[in-house]
Amino acid sequence: MRLSRELTHLAQCLATVAGLPGPGWPTKRDIRWKRWLQLVEEHQLGALLSGRWSADWNLPPDVESQLQERYVRAGNAAAVQTIEFLRTLRALNGVAEAVVLKGAALVPVLYREAAERSMWDIDLLFRSPEDQEKARALLEQRGCRARRNLRGHHHLPALVNPVNKMAFELHLNLVTPPLAQGFMDEIWQKRRRIEQAPVPNFYVLDDAALLAHQCIHALNDPIESPLLRSLFEIAWLASRLDAAGQTALKDLAARWGIGTIVGRGLWLAADVFGSPTLLERPPCGAYEFWSRARLGWCDYRTPWQKWRRHVAAAHVVHMLEGASDRNVLTPLGIAVRDTWNAVRARVVQRFSRSEAPPRRGSMPSAVLGDTILLFDERSGETHLLNRLAAKVWQATDGQLSADGIAELLESEGVSSADTRKALRALIVKGILEA
Amino acid sequence: MTQPTRTWQLGPGFFVSAPDGTPLSAAADVVFGRMLAAQPPPEGALCVHLDARRAGAGWQLYADSVPIVRACADNNLAPVVEGTMVACAARTRSDCVAFHAGCVEIAGRGVLLLGEKGSGKSTLTLALALQGGRYLGDEVVFVRLDDRRIEAFPKAAALKEESFALFGEAPTWYSPLRGALRYYQPPDTAPLFHSIPKADLIVVPRYRPSGELAVTELARHETALMLVQQCFGGLGRNPQALEIIAGLSKAPAHLVEYSAAQDAAAAVLRLCNEVKS
């Protein structure tokens, strides 16, 4: 696989952590460190790299200190995450039996400490819908609230603790569309307990199933899963799998028809880190092409931009693979709607004087004398409206047209041109609906 | 035989314990000495047991037997305990909004000190506390949602090397982020949960190595934006934070640019008197 020199260097650093061959150090040493750090951020690797730093990596001192900063912050967060995670497992003990998945399961298996692997989302697998419901009731009783509705998904909508922001995803299956119940029964029976855990009910999947799930998860989660870290974890798990585990993985793949999806993860990881492939190489498809491209995506201006890029690409790939449950025209429809909205916001508004621009919902506000402070819950941005913008915003009740607002504010000494300019600015910023 | 433990209370239902007589408990005492629990944690309280085990030249910190993070050297232990436990204290409270700020009570008036990292906030907070102010905290200040009162979090003030000469000798610790550090606990420190009705004055300190003292009045929106920036976990954590910020920003606020902490403290005391009159 051809990787940029920044990705090659980063992958080689990771390979040394896990004792893997890796892609080798890049031949050209002129690493763009800013981009290297963007990749570290994108793939959430800063704390791990800082914790395992080696002089062989030849990091410039300022890059080292930035990694150290990430490690300290990760350590502070890890304490909160671990305490909340253990508190939840303790509360579930005797109520509902669960198997811990993903990051929280990988911490005791692969990592030296919690700081090396952040886990704001805790994924728990349940055997039955009854146990899943009991867990949901318990978390809701403790103040957790569902983030958004998910229809027909393999886990319930994430339940978020509003105080510490930890999210809990309660699974009945590992993926959508679901894997066979026989497979789920089998991996449940083979689950193992983390012996050194301070709670008696800390169970994870056995080594073969853990690796299989990591492969499935790495390529199916288009955004939240940082791909390079996921591939690294696949490579690390694969390299640790003993002969019995390898046989068990091959057996699982053959009997339950998951060879392609697991093989994809293993081969992509092997391409980057030189780890064991274990299964036969699956036919190369859109998935592989997309995943290779995704590894280098890191320079987003906003999380929204990142989300759209990943989701759009994932959607196209799913369609090409024939695995999309959505209409073929959906992405086209989204693109047309977005373009229309952009045109309306920037151009049409200048000519359309009869429309009544409404305020957007979910924007708590506080009046500070002449100015207004707004918080956009969707983007997490805070806006401070100056005197003119505040007047315009207060006048936009969804009833008055742009002309009406201009007329109203003209009586308060604001020129019509200034009002329209402010209206446009508020629409462009997403504070008013176009 | 069970090893005796030492327990600190960091929130209404949040306790931290560590084996007594160890470097870990000594480090925790340096930071949270005034928050030592008078009573054992009540039934149902969240009590996290910390432990530290040797890891090379440093220590591996454990919370409830789970390895969390490493202190790179002996003198890094107190900053690590401080960072992890302050984060937990701020993230376990749903009854208030937490701000990254210092707070002192001067003659019955609440002074809130807001500032970026390295702005000299802790230095000025401590200087004010040593000139007759009562110390409520230098890192985290809680504003309660129900009665809007400002609540003390009286951990020791952490000062960076530039301020060592001002406050006398104390053991020196080290943080990779903040460099050399010393912890000072002012004699007049408010107990945990002590609260004051409101901020009567907001001070935004800005340390500069040289230059005259300059005090500039801040507009309400500037204060509000500063409060937004210093709100723990951002506004997304609690939409009511915006109301709290709107309330706090009504207080008179000043940017205090200083090179000598004593001068800045004197200026803040003057401002405080003006508020009083």
Image (spheres, coloured by chain):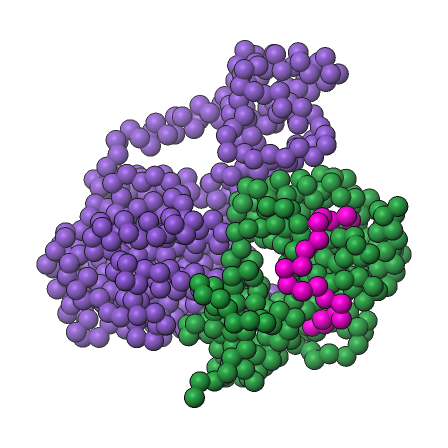
**Which chain does the purple colour mark?**
A
Q: Residue at x 22, y 49 (%)?
A: A129
Name the residue rendered at 48%, 82% in the picture.
Answer: B53
Q: Residue at x 59, y 46 (%)?
A: B145
Q: Is residue B238 above or below residue B116?
A: above
Q: Colour of chain B?
A: green
Q: Is residue A372 left or right of residue B10?
A: right
- Principal secondary structure, stretch drawn in magenta: loop
The residue closer to the viewer here, A44 or A384, is: A384
**Can you give x and y, in whole percent of width and height, for residue A344 in the image?**
50, 21
Q: Quick one: B81 or B162, which is closer to the camera?
A: B81
Q: Is residue B191 magenta?
A: yes
Would residue A225 appear left or right of B263 to someone viewing this image? left
Is any part of residue A229 visible from this angle? no
Q: Is B226 situated left or right of B212 in this image?
A: left
Magenta segment boundaries in residue numbering:
B183-201
For the N terminus of chain B, which image quadrant? Answer: bottom left
